[in-house]
Amino acid sequence: MTRANKLAGKKIAVIGGSSGIGYGAAEILLEAGAHITIISSTQEKVDHAVQQLSSTGGNVQGSVGDVRDEAAFTDLLLALAPLDHIVFSSVDMIIRGSVADANLSDAAELLGVKFWGCFVVSKAIAKHDIVVPGGSLTLTSGAAALRPKKGASIGGALNGGLITATVALADELSAKRIRVNTVVPGLVKTPLWVKLGNSEERLNEIYDQAAQMLSVGFVASPEHVAEAYLYAVRADYANGSTIVIGTFFFFSI
Ligand SMILES: NC(=O)c1ccc[n+]([C@@H]2O[C@H](COP(=O)([O-])OP(=O)(O)OC[C@H]3O[C@@H](n4cnc5c(N)ncnc54)[C@H](OP(=O)(O)O)[C@@H]3O)[C@@H](O)[C@H]2O)c1
């Protein structure tokens, strides 16, 4: 094995890989020669993503799984075991808005996918032999964790909590020789922003405005932040790490 083909034939599950940032991670890991299983809760999205990813060649399959259902999701991971690595990027919606107007029941429900979903997966791999020794789990936070502003107190706390969890999980899973890291993306053009009800026109305005304020001069697409996932999966010395890629750009939705 050479350094270039370190991930060749490695079995990697990308949870949330049917869209956006997870799709970008699946694509770059596939290009690195890994065997990818993308997982998300909608059959149609999984099928579409598998079809698109396989059109460029490579070994890719899909499974439908909902991280809100701990027992069924754990069974799914057990069925896919042994895995070399897991990437987690699932999210339902972003929680934004003033705390005075917050619907706390809705917010608690939304934590079910991104926040508790990470723990459903972490618990499964801590308790069972799902990821092989020497493997890894890569989570996804968000730049609102680092520069929280008004309107992002709940979402920022969720993202900050995942960074904290990463450090503790890395310590705990070291007994199984499984690394845990978190990617912290800045603004990325993904279907998430459309799902939040923004029109294409409004999104283009936001992206143009953001591009002028970001030092790189453009807003990332998933392929740009995919590099951070490749690093987290490949780098044997990275554990408990927060890998920041991009800058927080806040806008109201
Ligand atoms: N986009 C940004 O600007 C940005 C910035 C910073 C951080 N992030 C973070 O990056 C991560 C990915 O965001 P994204 O923009 O790529 O979002 P996205 O395009 O909406 O993708 C979300 C993925 O999660 C899956 N998912 C949703 N509910 C699920 C469930 N119950 N069980 C399993 N999978 C589920 C979706 O597929 P199904 O609908 O089929 O389940 C989809 O594959 C999130 O943690 C987000 O907070 C994004």
Image: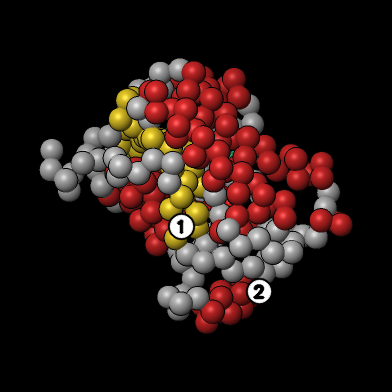
Residue 244: mark in rendering: 1
How many marks are shown on the rendered structure? 2
Within the image, what quadrant is residue 203 found in? bottom right
- Marks 2 and 1 in Cβ contact (< 8 Å): no
Mark 2 and mark 1 lie on one chain; the one further toward the N terminus is 2
Residue 138 at x, y percent in the picture = 44, 41
Q: Is residue 79 left or right of residue 57?
A: right
* Picture layout, residue 196 above or below residue 22: below
Q: Quadrant of the N terminus?
A: top left
Is 126 or 20 nearer to us in this picture? 126
Q: Is mark 2 within 8 Å of ligand 1?
A: no
Residue 65: mark in rendering: none
Residue located farthest toward the left when viewing the structure as drawn: 2
Residue 132 at x, y percent in the picture = 33, 25
- Residue at 70% x, 43% y: name it: 110
Q: Quadrant of the C terminus?
A: bottom right
Foreground mark, 2 or 1, reads 1
Secondary structure, mark 1, is strand
Secondary structure, mark 2, is helix
Name the amino acid, label 2.
Arg
Whole-Å distance between the Cαs marked 2 and 1? 26 Å
Residue 131 at x, y percent in the picture = 38, 26
- Residue at 63% x, 35% y: name it: 116
Q: Which residue is mark 2?
A: 202
Residue located farthest toward the bottom when viewing the structure as drawn: 212
Whether residue 173 is visible to the viewer of this picture, yes or no, is: yes
Residue located farthest toward the right when viewing the structure as drawn: 100
Q: Count residues near mark 1 (Cα–Cα under 10 Å), then give few for <14, some for 14-19, many for 20+.
A: some
Q: Is residue 10 left or right of residue 156?
A: left
Residue 66 at x, y percent in the picture = 59, 32
* Picture layout, residue 180 above or below residue 244: above
